[in-house]
Amino acid sequence: METSANILIVEDQPAERESLARLLRTENYQVHSVANATCALESIGNQFDLVLSDVRLGGSSGLDLLKMWKSRLPATPFILMTAFGEIETAVEAVKAGADDYLVKPIRPTELLAKIARSLDAARKRAAGPASSNGHHNGEQESANGLHFAANAPLEEIERAAIERTLEDCKGNRTHAAQALGISVRTLQRKLKAWNAEAEAAHS
């Protein structure tokens, strides 16, 4: 199997940290794992190809780590994990520059797919000139395929994330809600509100 990307895992729970490391090593990834944001930033010079971090890191925040990391190495793919099932957290992560996000409990196939997609997107960005990516200045692109202006409102990013997840789940609302970390009822309520807005706009 050909892959040797160097991945940094930032997870404060030892058992989860080791479980993630074992999974990635079985896929021939090089893995370095740390327990907090401070240790992660201390190792920033190790040329990691991707960072996989929990949102909650004991006394620190994965979102803060994301912002600090991206301020120094903006090209590094960054995936955040959260156990709290809040779409707002995922939206804030994308807004802050995350390439993707995962809701715990982590499903290995989903994790590996998102890592591969993020690494592939990073390679494509590095291979082509910035002027040929088809996006205007001030527009961001994440590995999950979302495109939005740097000053886009959170509601716009949330809607794009939900629509993309529904597409990935082939329209299955139960699976989409699980992937987003929200209830099916919440998802249905949001979709109903957007449909009402669309109908009002065309009336």
Image: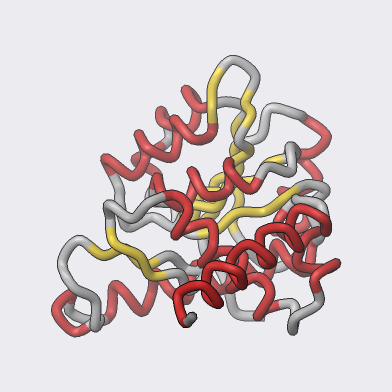
Q: Which residue is at a point 67% across and 66% down the rendered structure image? A: 191
Image-based side of 134 in relation to 2, left or right: left
Image-based side of 196 in relation to 119, left or right: right
Vertical relation: 101 (above or below) 96: below
Image-based side of 165 in relation to 135, left or right: right
Q: Nearer the viewer, residue 127 or 2?
A: 127
Q: In this figure, what is the number of numbered marks?
A: 0
What is the basis of the colouring in this image?
secondary structure
Residue 162: image location, x then y, percent: 62, 65
Q: Which residue is at a point 48% across and 32% down the rendered structure image? A: 40
From this viewpoint, is residue 191 visible? yes
Q: Nearer the viewer, residue 149 or 140?
A: 149
Residue 68: image location, x then y, percent: 35, 34
Vertical relation: 121 (above or below) 93: below
Quarter of the image holding residue 75?
bottom left
Quarter of the image holding residue 161?
bottom right
